[in-house]
């Protein structure tokens, strides 16, 4: 698959013309960041009307430890804070999923969303193994100097377990 000037995959038709490549079923692995939004936009372009996007939002497993252990000394407050963090993550995931679903609907694209907690590469590979996808789309790592947590995707681990192309969409700040 070659890339067009805009970074989108193209394919050659029987007549030798280069056209935008389409994938009928895309596994989009992203979250609500500028890079994740760029990946979602690319997935929409590639799916096109009548396509399908299966959106996997992976919450990195480091969130399991975000319970304020170092400053919460009362077990009841500790548990309440843990529930607050979990509920906040659930609300953010639901809002982002609803936004992407609405956009997919405007483009005539079928959409489903699932959230998993764990190591991103493992979650993506396991979810991929359970479905039929033509392409996996992810955002690139956040560039150095851009504020926010830089979660890591073990690309080598992921690529070894995929049997379809993996598209890494550049961060919009690059």
Image: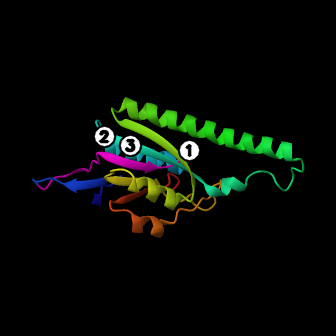
* Residue 18 included in the magenta stretch of the image: yes
Q: Is residue 162 left or right of residue 153?
A: left
The answer to whether the residues at label 2 and label 3 have Cβ atoms under 8 Å apart is: yes
Instruction: Quadrant for the N terminus, please.
Output: bottom left
Region rendered in magenta: 16-32
- Horizontal and vertical percent position of residue 75: 85, 47
Q: Is residue 7 left or right of residue 171?
A: left
- Horizontal and vertical percent position of residue 83: 73, 41
Q: Residues within 10 Å of mark 3 (few under 14, many from 20)?
A: many
Q: Which residue is mark 1?
A: 32
Q: Is residue 4 above or below residue 51?
A: below
For the residues carrying marks 2 and 1, which lies nearer the camera in this image? 2
The furthest residue to the left: 15
Q: Is residue 94 left or right of residue 105?
A: right
Task: Determine which of the numbered discs, if any, sits on residue 145 in the image.
Answer: none
The picture quadrant where one finds residue 51 is top left
Residue shown at the point (45%, 34%) measured from the top left: 101
Residue shown at the point (33%, 51%) measured from the top left: 133
Q: Which residue is mark 2?
A: 51
- Horizontal and vertical percent position of residue 49: 29, 36
Q: Which residue is mark 3?
A: 53
Q: Residues within 10 Å of mark 1 (few under 14, many from 20)?
A: some
């Amino acid at each position: 698959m070659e890339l067009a000037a805009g970074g989108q995959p193209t394919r050659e038709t029987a007549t030798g013309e280069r056209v935008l490549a389409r994938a009928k079923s895309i596994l989009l692995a992203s979250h609500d960041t500028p890079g994740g939004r760029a990946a979602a936009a690319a997935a929409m372009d590639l799916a096109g009307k009548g396509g399908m996007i299966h959106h996997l939002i992976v919450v990195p497993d480091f969130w399991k430890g975000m319970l304020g252990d170092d400053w919460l000394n009362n077990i009841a407050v500790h548990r309440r804070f843990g529930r607050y963090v979990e509920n906040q993550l659930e609300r953010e995931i639901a809002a982002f999923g609803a936004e992407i679903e609405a956009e997919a609907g405007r483009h005539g694209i079928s959409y489903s969303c699932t959230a998993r907690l764990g190591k991103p590469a493992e979650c993506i590979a396991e979810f991929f193994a359970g479905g039929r996808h033509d392409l996996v789309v992810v955002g690139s790592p956040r560039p150095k100097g851009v504020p926010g947590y830089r979660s890591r995707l073990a690309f080598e681990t992921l690529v070894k377990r995929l049997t379809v192309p993996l598209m890494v969409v550049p961060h919009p700040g690059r």
